[in-house]
Each structure stands twice: as C-alpha cells, then as structure tokens.
Amino acid sequence: MARTFVRSTVAGVALALALTSGAVVLGGSDDGPVRTGPVAAGPGAPLDGLRGGDLDRGVDALRSRLRAQPTDFTSWATLGTAYVEQARTRGDPALYGAADRALGRSLELRPGNDAALAGRAAVAAARHDFPGALRHAEAALAENPYSERALATRVDALVELGRYDAASRAADEADARRPGVPVFTRYAYVRELRGDVPAARRVLERALDGATAPGDVAYVTTALGQLAWRQGEYGTALRHCGAALRADATYLPALECRARARAARGEYAPAIAALREVVDRQPLPGPLLALGELYEARGEPRRAEDQYRLVAAWAALARANGVNPDLDTALASADHGDKAAALRAARAEWTRRQTVHTADALGWALHVNGRDEEALRHARRATGPGFREASFLYHRGMIERAVGDTASARRSLKAALRLNPGFSPVGSREAREALRALGGGGS
C-alpha cells in the first residue's frame, strides 16, 4: 500500500501542517505586547519570550502570581493561552482542559475581555473546532480590533474551513492592523495556498528581518525551511533549519524539518536519530508517522509498526480531551490501519470542512477502499487550486492509474517527483515504481 508522510495538525492549528500553527502570543491587552516568540508577555503578565523550559517556568510564575492576586483576569487569560502552547509543545491534549478553566476564570472576573476570548479561539483551533475558533476570534476582535492573537487565529480558522478568499482578506487586514511575526507567517501560508511561493518566501524573509528574539528567529527560519522542503530544495531547507536550531536548540519543529530534509536526501540514520528525539519529547502523529516510514523504508517493519500504534494511542487521548483527530487518523489509517475506519474519519471531516487537505484525505481513503471513480473527484479538487503539494499529486496519480487514465497518471506522478522528489521515503519510491510500470521512466 502506498504511503505518504502525514503532518500533524494538533497545535495552535493545523494547516498542513505546521506553518500556520505559528506563534501563540500571550498577554492581556494587545495595545503593545512584547512579542519575542511563540509566547510573549503583555502588561501584567510575568512572561517574557518563553519556549520549552522557559514556558514551564513562566506557567509556574503565573500560578504563583495568581495565588497572590487571584482576581488578576489578565494573568488568568495569559495562563490559559500558555496552557495551549504547553499542550502543543508536549503533545499533551489533556492540558486543554486546564486552559479552559483558566480562560473561564478570566471571563468570570472580566466578562468579554479580549485576551480571554482570543485564548478561547486558540483552544478551539487546537481542538480542530474551527467554527468555534472563528466565532471566538470575531468576538475578541469586536472588543479589540487590534488583537494580534485574534487576527492570527481568524486567518487560521478561515484557512482550515476552506474559505481561502476570506482568509486572504483576513490576512491583508491583519497585516494592515498588526504586522509582525505571527501575522506574517499566516500571510505567507495564504500566499502559498494560492500558488504564489515567491510571495510566501518574501513575506517570511520580511518577518525574519524583523525577528530579533531567538524564539522568533527559530520560528520564522523553520517556516522558511519547511517551505523550501515542500519545493524540494533540501539544501536550503537544511540551512534554514540549522539557523533555527542555532537560535533555539530546543525548537522541535526545526529538528523535524531538518530530519525530513535529510531523509529526502537518503540520509536515513541521522534523520531517524532526529525524529526519535522529536517523538520522545512531542509524540504527535506527524513525526511518529515520519519515523515509522523511515523504519519501513529501511526494512525494519516491527519498529515501524510501533510508531503507527502510537498514533492510534495519541488519537484516543486527543479525542478524550475534546480534540477532533479525524484528518490525522484518516490518512494514518488509510496507509497503516483500518481502511474502513479511514473512510469514516475522512467523510466525517469532509462534512465539517472542505479544504484541499480534507479533499486529499477523502480521495485517498476512497482509493484504498476501492472506490476510485469517486476518489478521483476529490483528488482533482485537492490539486485544483494553486497550492502545490507533492503528496497530493502522488495520490492523484495513483488514483488515475487505478481508473486506467495512464497519461494523466504519468503527468501527476512526474509532477509530484519534480516538485519534491523526496516527499516520502516510501511514497517517493512507489511513485517511481508506478511511473516505470506506466512507461514513464520512473523519474
């Protein structure tokens, strides 16, 4: 069965995946927060550019502050949003409940405060409740039109709901109101979705020019590395991810990005070592599946299966804590588990939001269940807009092959390998084998 890397969407938001799940900005008022990374301080909040261990220390400091000043609604809102970031960095969805409680307390103390409403938008996005995320973000913006968190989360939610034109307008508005790293990265992803990779790169470079704190530098250079990887520019990806790790040696997305670039170049041993470090600290579906496929490509099926089983365990934990994992489980199950369950999950997600990513997942789930004519409609929808993703093209090519459209299958598979020849250690190999079988030369 053909497979692809699946990228996790659990974290401040999905977006295929890692680009727009960007920096979470903390603080009470958005009149002028100091933004120094994924967590930044606002007035009254004892946080200052926290990530990793610093984030944990910041949460402890907030708890101490709230024991002394339990009616500080700003710190309750900051604590709630910090829990969202902590859940992301740990891969622990149980922390969303703690976020709910802290944000609820903030709203009890000061009904309608924009910081808590924006925090609720972040929780909803993390749980993949994108209508809820949009609703809370709009409520926060009604209170404070310049809320950076709410502006960014509104873009995320619109993208994840497949409302790309509205997301583009929201990104323009966010850029006009609160230009900065969180907004720039979302703006860049919207441009990439529309097929304008040069513009996406320019926006990220602009963001990097304005990034001074290590957290911001790590975040933006990783985004540049991920963009380069998706274009098959592995040397560039490695340079960016190396710069990110020099800025913040603990930044796991950079380590994962570097691992994927090394895997694409056939450097499996260092890629596996890096991904093992990632999953030890953040056991999310994306890196777990990436590690499993590397083991599989290297002829170690038992180790691969261990990683795939952990994905199922994560999905159960996520669901128990209010996270909707259907998009993750649809692709994972299609390639590594229960195909009927994959189709049920993909159909359920499609009813909630019709994006290029859900179209791809549903098309692939239909294909592995032998429903290729129906699958092709969705695969075409996934590859129809400007966004170019090698795994989508690969899926389309394999489905076209299954329905007997040999010429189209050759074009799609060649396009996938031309765009990103190392998009998956297993999928890339199977794409080449299919091309050879179709008389396309395998390259």
Image (spheres, rainbow, N blue to C red):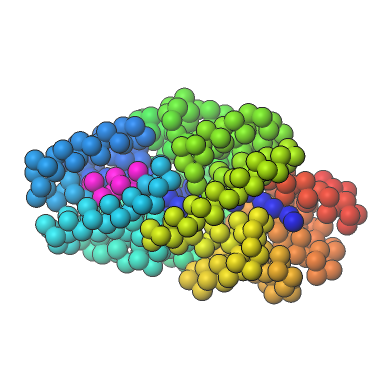
Q: Position of residue 440 (x, y in %)?
A: 87, 53
The majority secondary structure of the magenta stretch comes to: helix
- Nearer the observer, 383 or 330: 330
Q: Quadrant of residue 297?
A: top right
Residue lying furthest right in this view? 439
Relative to residue 437, is residue 352 depicted above or below?
A: below
Q: Position of residue 334 (x, y in %)?
A: 65, 60
Labels in figure, total: 0
Q: In which quarter of the image is the N terminus?
A: bottom right
Relative to residue 234, is residue 11 depicted above or below?
A: below
Residue 320 placement, left or right of 411: left
Instruction: Check if residue 335 falls in the magenta segment.
Output: no
One can see residue 357 in this view: no
- Nearer the observer, 49 or 236: 49
Relative to residue 269, is residue 124 depicted above or below?
A: below
- Span highlighted in magenta in the image: 78-86
Q: Which residue is painted at 27% across and 33% down in the image?
A: 57
- Nearer the observer, 168 or 431: 431
Q: Where is residue 283 in the image (x, y as percent from the top left)?
A: 49, 44
Instruction: Check if residue 80 falls in the magenta segment.
Output: yes
Q: Which residue is painted at 51% across and 52% down in the image?
A: 313
Q: Which residue is painted at 57% across and 29% down in the image?
A: 239
- Nearer the observer, 206 or 425: 425
Residue 95 placement, left or right of 209: left
Residue lying furthest top in this view? 246
One can see residue 86 in this view: yes
Q: Which residue is painted at 80% across and 70% down in the image?
A: 403
Q: Position of residue 383 (x, y in %)?
A: 65, 62
